[in-house]
Image (cartoon, helix red, strand yellow):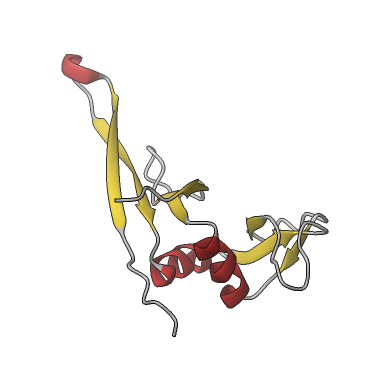
Amino acid sequence: MAQARKAETTTKSTTSGRGSTGGTTRRASSHTTTDHDEIKKWVEARGGKPATVKRTGSKEDAGILRIDFQDRKRSLEDISWDEFFEKFDGNHLAFLYQEKLKTGEESRFFKFVHKEEK
């Protein structure tokens, strides 16, 4: 029987700006999650799709995970969300991402990190 996964999300804020001399200070925050719905929503909102690096997997393994933002790198091939999350969970990964740049624009920054065991 499949074991239920426990999704976690954490947030870390960093501050940048002019400090005490005046002006505005902006916060850029990063989030780390293992929640499949949250990851899928973030990726698709930015026009991305789950992908793998070609020739790094097999029929049983998705290979090296990536997110393809339609930049159409020849080294990437699309995979299903099911394949993506099977590899993601199997390697105990978490998704670290940023919603907005310090300028306030939407960010595409993300990276896969090892999930911290608690």
In-front residue for pair 2/75: 2
Q: Quadrant of residue 59?
A: bottom right
In-front residue for pair 32/17: 32
Residue in the image at 29% along x and 41% along y: 12
> Is 75 located above or below residue 59 in the figure?
above
Q: Quadrant of residue 83?
A: bottom right
The tally of labels here is 0
Residue in the image at 29% along x and 25% along y: 17
> Is 41 located above or below residue 56 in the figure?
below
Residue 81 rendering spot, x and y as whole percentages: 57, 74
The residue most toward the front is 1
Residue 48 rendering spot, x and y as whole percentages: 59, 64
In-front residue for pair 38/84: 84
Q: Is residue 44 left or right of residue 83?
A: left
Q: Is residue 30 left or right of residue 45?
A: left
The residue most toward the bottom is 1
Regarding residue 114, the answer to whether it shows in the image is yes
- Position of the N terminus, as image quadrant, is bottom left
Residue in the image at 28% along x and 47% along y: 11
In-front residue for pair 2/100: 2
Residue 56 rendering spot, x and y as whole percentages: 78, 56
Residue 107 rendering spot, x and y as whole percentages: 46, 49
> Is 61 located above or below residue 33 in the figure?
below
Regarding residue 46, the answer to whether it shows in the image is no
